Image (tube, rainbow, N blue to C red):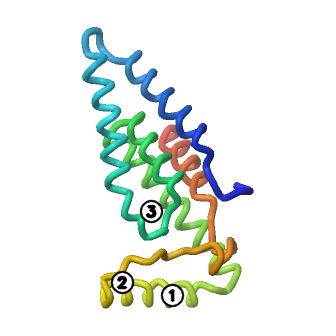
């Protein structure tokens, strides 16, 4: 959280652990199919979420973390856990924007960003640390973790 990054070794550890556990939990003779399904889910979620990274709305580590979560949990369960994490993130972001008194400023910025995107068809980063600072950033990986825990508890 201090560096605003998710170390790749965390992602690689989660990816490897998820793959091993998926193979170990598979039915005898189905290990190849289970491993293939795991890899397909990871790749599909990475591809589906990549546009959010390309627009710099979400960090690369967050995309990889969501892909590993979905790979391990499966299509539906992974989607639920990620959705719970997004709800936690939305609540945290709203609270932060309200406490800082910048909600309308950021909503206007978002609207202007999309107007420019549709008008010029030029993809530019939504967020740049050197311009926006870290005051508008939330620890999304933490939100995903809380969403994952919420999924497991519910």
Q: Earlier in the sequence, mark 3 or mark 1?
A: 3
Q: Earlier in the sequence, mark 3 or mark 2?
A: 3
* Front position in the image: 133 or 154: 133
* Front position in the image: 122 or 144: 122
Give the answer, above or below, for where 116 lies relative to 20: below
Residue 57 falls left or right of residue 102 = left
Label 3: how many residues lie within 10 Å, few (<14), some (14-19) or many (20+)? some
Helix or strand or loop: what does disc 3 sit on? Answer: helix
How far apart are the two marked residues, 1 and 2, measured between alpha carbons?
Answer: 12 Å
Residue at image position (58%, 49%) is: 146
Question: What residue is disc 1 on?
Answer: 109
Marking on residue 117: 2
Question: What residue is disc 3 on?
Answer: 53
* Front position in the image: 22 or 12: 12
Marking on residue 135: none
Q: Where, quadrant-wise, is the N terminus in this rendering?
A: bottom right
């Amino acid at each position: 959280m201090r560096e605003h990054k998710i170390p790749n070794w965390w992602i690689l550890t989660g990816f490897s652990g998820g793959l091993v556990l998926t193979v170990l939990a598979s039915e005898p003779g189905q290990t190849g199919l289970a491993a293939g399904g795991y890899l397909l889910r990871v790749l599909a979620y990475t591809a589906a979420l990549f546009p959010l990274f390309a627009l710099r709305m979400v960090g690369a580590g967050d995309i990889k973390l969501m892909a590993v979560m979905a790979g391990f949990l499966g299509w539906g369960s992974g989607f639920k856990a990620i959705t719970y994490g997004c709800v936690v993130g939305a609540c945290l972001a709203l609270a932060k924007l309200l406490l800082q008194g910048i909600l309308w400023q950021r909503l206007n910025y978002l609207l202007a960003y999309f107007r420019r995107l549709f008008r010029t068809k030029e993809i530019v980063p939504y967020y740049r640390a050197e311009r926006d600072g870290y005051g508008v950033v939330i620890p999304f990986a933490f939100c995903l973790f809380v969403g994952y825990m919420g999924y497991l508890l519910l």
